[in-house]
Amino acid sequence: MEISFDKATRDIEFVRSELRRLISDPELSAILGDDVVTRMKKWDSIIDSKMSEPFSLVIIGDFKRGKSTIINAILGRSAAPVNVAPETFTINRFSYGETASVEAVLANGKRVMLTPDDLARDRLLGLLDYFPGALEYIDVKSDAPILKEIQVVDTPGLSDLDELDYLVKDFLVKADAVIYVASALSPFSESEQYFIASQIVPQNFSKVFVLINMIDAMNSMEDIERIVNHISEKCAQIIPVAEVYGISGIDEYRRKIGLNRPDIKGFQEYYENQFLKFERALKNELITQKDTIRTQRVFSMLSIMMTDTLSRLNMINDMIKMDKEKLERLKNDFEAECTNLQAALDQQKPKILLSITEMKQEAERWMYEFFTKLREDIVTCRSSADDADVERHFYSYLMDKVGEAYRRCLEIHGGRLNDIINEMGTQLSRKLGIQNLASARISCSEAVNVNSFVADKIKQAAQQGSERETGFPSATLPFFRNIMRKNRQSDIIDCALENYDDIRNSTITDLKECYKNFEIFAVQQLDDIYRTQEEVGRETVDQAIEMARSNESTEIMRKNIERASEIVIGAVQVLTQY
């Protein structure tokens, strides 16, 4: 059954009004708890923004993938700053304006007028300390025609985020559609695949474009097809709604603004056709259907909110049905087991440290194997030093390869450590005898993000050994700066070979330091998780006992739960149409 946009809008407003009725009622909101109510208010605010602001297309991807160049190509304007080094380290939002302008939007709501030149990384870094508040994003106005239909958001590279990470995730939640930019030079690392699976897939976007940029670096159509097919196969496994295109952002940008387009390989027509195919899909499958896509995104968010709320209500309903004597026994058993808390922790910590030691040894072995192969590749490049493609891409290739290998070790082992800590946390809660109550409570409270919290902490621990601006091993950067100072390509490759041992040794030294941080973090995190389990268990049991002491309060609670459930179920019935 086809449902009109007007009806969908009315239904969205009905569901939102029901949710507001739920959280504005003192008795019902008390049942859900402050954390759940706060989260629901935040989601309602996000939905309000989505319904009132322009359709938002977010460009995301690892650093040095050419995101800003692609935005310029889409807009047909020199709107986003580009350079050899990563330029975008802030969130830049591009929207329509008859007159071009640039403003810094601060977290306190204030705005600071800038010039287009201020978007350059060095200039903007110098201005940040003078802003009267923390920077939230840069608002760029342009008269590009496409911006009459949508707004485009340029984000920092995923390896360049650090404390900006939460802002990028916030924009991702608010996005209506996503373009993920990969590179033909570093095709789809495991960390990129993990980001798509963990951050983009859960958002339930109806449309995701994956652009494989820099295909102009490939020497043959066979190479281009191989890269595109490889990434297409990976995307099909991770996010089936994705459409994959191999493009050259720089070639299209030059074509749009009338600059010279070198065509050494004779693939220029192919580059142009591929970008036109992408733009056609962007228009036909996204822009012309943006109202439908937006309502689908909102309905998806509302459905998630409903599921969360029903889980909370069901948990409370089950809890108040528990027998008083059973609750008292549970409390006594729980308190007795808590006396063994430190002993249980001490038994687990050596296991974690041993696992991290094994990970560190495995990472060293991987890196030595990687650098052996890298040296062979550098020598091969040396024999082709006069080749124009080698000259254009060698430095980026070398830095990307080392950085990706470094990050891949941390990503793989960080995920493995995350699993170990979560499993140990489950075992600890099982020892406390609260696994059922704790899991129910955790699913509906601030602890719902335990897994992502652990992953964020692992990332922070890993980045302590890295330079903040690049996510690159800090001890290795001086050697790369020496290489970058060389002018001729043959000198660049010779310098890379001369510094090869130092690059390898400093990278591995930096990596070892990260694993020391892993050890410190893992022990602390296990303490925190166990403490959370203890607090959740004690609070849950105490709350259940308190409710069980008064038949009157229990009856009132049951009636309030019924009232809340009726509101939620009524909203769910509306959502089932979509």
Image: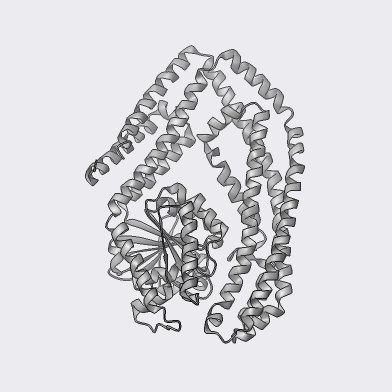
Quarter occupied by residue 136? bottom left
Reply above or below: 90 against 331.
below
Q: Please identify the residue farthest to the front as the structure is shown.
A: 222
Give the left or right position of residue 303, taking residue 546 as reference.
Answer: left
Residue at the image position 37 percent from the left and 32 percent from the top: 24
Residue 114: % across, % down:
41, 70
Residue at the image position 63 percent from the left and 41 percent from the top: 422
Q: Classify the position of the C terminus by image quarter.
A: top left
Residue 156: % across, % down:
49, 63
Q: Is residue 482 visible?
A: no
Number of marks: 0
Q: Nearer the viewer, residue 522 or 25?
A: 522
Q: Nearer the viewer, residue 35 or 389?
A: 389
Residue at the image position 47 percent from the left and 16 percent from the top: 554
Reply above or below: 95 against 31.
below
Q: Specify how the rendered protein is coloured.
A: one colour
Quarter occupied by residue 365? bottom right
Quarter occupied by residue 1? top left
Q: Nearer the viewer, residue 135 or 292?
A: 292
Residue at the image position 35 percent from the left and 33 percent from the top: 572
Give the left or right position of residue 16, taking residue 443 as reference.
Answer: left
Q: Is residue 462 visible?
A: yes
Residue 358: % across, % down:
74, 52
Q: Nearer the viewer, residue 152 or 62?
A: 62
